[in-house]
Amino acid sequence: MAVAQVLPEARNRFCRWSIFRQTQEKLTNVFYQANPTFDFELRKCVNEADTVEEFESSWSNLLGRYYLMDNEWVQFLYNIRDQWVPVFLRDVFFGELSTVECNDALSLFFDGVLSTSTTVQLLIKQYEKAVSNLHEKELKDDFDTSNTTPVLKTPSPMEKQAANLYTRKIFMKFQGELFETLANPATLVDDAGTVTTYRVAKFGEENKAHTVRFDVFQTKATCSCRMFDFSGIICRHVLSVFRAKNVLMLPSEYVLKRWTKNAKTSVGESMPESAIGLPSSFQESPIVRHNNLRHEAVKYVEEGAKSIHVYNVAMNALQEASKRVAAVKSKGTNEANGGNQERHAIENQSSSSLSREEKEKKILELSTELERTNQKCEVYRAILLALFRDMEDQKLKLSVKVQNARLSLKE
C-alpha cells in the first residue's frame, strides 16, 4: 500500500464503522434479512474479543454457523483483520476511548450533504457549520470541567486526584475503570524477584482473566489487555493491582497530558483560571480570550434564568454589549482605513526617504492589525450569538415551568 511505502513506521487503520456498514450492504440480501442477529454477533465477535485466540475462535464459529467460509467479502475482511479489529491494534496508541466503534456523529460528519451534485460552496458552508458546532460543544465541555465538581463514588484518594487532573469526559472513563476494580479482584500468581504477577478476572468470568505484571521498585504495571497502550487510560486490571499493593496515588507516567485540564496550554503546570494579569502574549491566544469571555458571559445566563425580571435585565445588557462590539468593529475598520490614508500621505511626503521594503513592511503591519481586529470581532460575535440562543432556551424552559405551576394551582 502507498501509506506503508511512504510512511513505513506508521500503522494504517481502517474505519470499523465503515466496514460494518459495507458488510451490511454487501450481505443484506443473503444474511441480514434472513438472520437479523448476524449483525449483533459480528459486532460482538469483533468488539469484545480480549485476545487474538478468542477472536479467531469466535470468527471461525461465526463463519461456520452462517456458512460464510467461501464468501469473498468476509474472507477479505479476515485477511486485513490486523488493520481494523481492535484486538490486533492494542499495541498502538490511537487515543481512542472505547473499543467499540466511534460515535456515528464523527463518521457521519458530511452524511446527507455530500453527493455527486454537491457544490463546493455548500460543502464549505456545511463544514463551517459543523466546525462551529463542535467548537461550541468543546467550549461548553471546557466550562463544565473548570466550573463544576464531579461526584466521587469512592473514598479513594486516587479518584480525587484524577478528578483534579482529568477533563470531565476522561475522568468519567477513569472513574468507571476504578469502580470496576470492586468486581475484578487481583490474585497473586508469582512473587519471584522485583516483578510480581497477578491474575485479574471479573467475578463469574474467570475464563477471561488478564495478566498484570507489577514492578515494585518502579511502581509500574503492564496488563495483557493493553488498554493504556491503546487509549492512554489506565485499565481496571492495573488499578486492581494498585489497590492490592496499596498504591494510593496515580503514578505520573499514567497521566497523559492530552487528557488533562491543561492539555491546551504550555504555560505553567496547570490551566489558568483567567487571563487577567497574565502576560500579553498569553492573552493574544483566541482560545484563551474565547474561554474567558464565555466564562464571564455564562454568568448572565445562569442569573438571567432565575426570573423574568432578571432575564430582561440580562438580555438588555447583552444587546447593549452586542451594539458596542459592532461599534468597535466598525471603528477598527475605519481606523485601519484612516491609518492607510495617513500612511499614504506620509509616504507621498517622504517617498524619497522610505525604501520599497519599508513601505511593504508598514502595509503588512497594518493589514495584520486589521485582520486581527476582524478576528476578535468575529469571536465576540459568535459568543454573543451563542449566549442569545442560551438565553432564549432558558426563557422557554422558565415559561414552561411557570405554566405548569399555574396549572397545578388550578388543580
Image: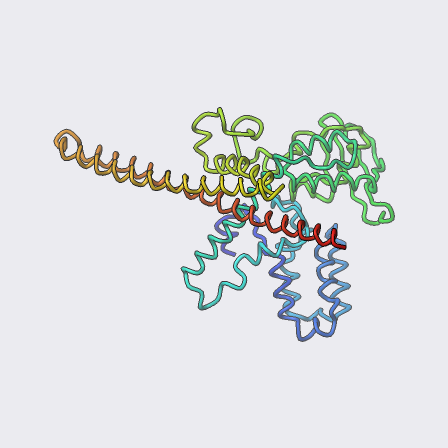
Q: Residue furthest front?
A: 410
39 left or right of 246 in image = left
Q: Position of residue 160 (x, y in %)?
A: 72, 31
Toward the viewer: 17 or 391?
Answer: 391
Question: Which quadrant holds residue 125?
Answer: bottom left
The correct choice, above or below, for 293 with respect to 58 in the image is: above
Question: Which quadrant holds residue 153?
Answer: top right
Q: How many marks?
A: 0
Q: Position of residue 66 (x, y in %)?
A: 75, 70
Q: Position of residue 238 (x, y in %)?
A: 75, 37
Question: Which quadrant holds residue 172?
Answer: top right
Q: Residue furthest right?
A: 204
Question: Which residue lies at the image location 74% right of the left edge and 54% below the top edge?
Answer: 410
Question: Which residue lies at the image location 60% right of the left edge and 51% below the top edge?
Answer: 396
Toward the viewer: 194 or 397?
Answer: 397
Q: How is the image coloured?
A: rainbow
- Look at the image and tell me in which quarter the C terminus lies: bottom right
Toward the viewer: 142 or 250?
Answer: 142
The correct choice, above or below, for 12 with respect to 93 in the image is: below
Q: Position of residue 270 (x, y in %)?
A: 58, 28
Toward the viewer: 235 or 309?
Answer: 309
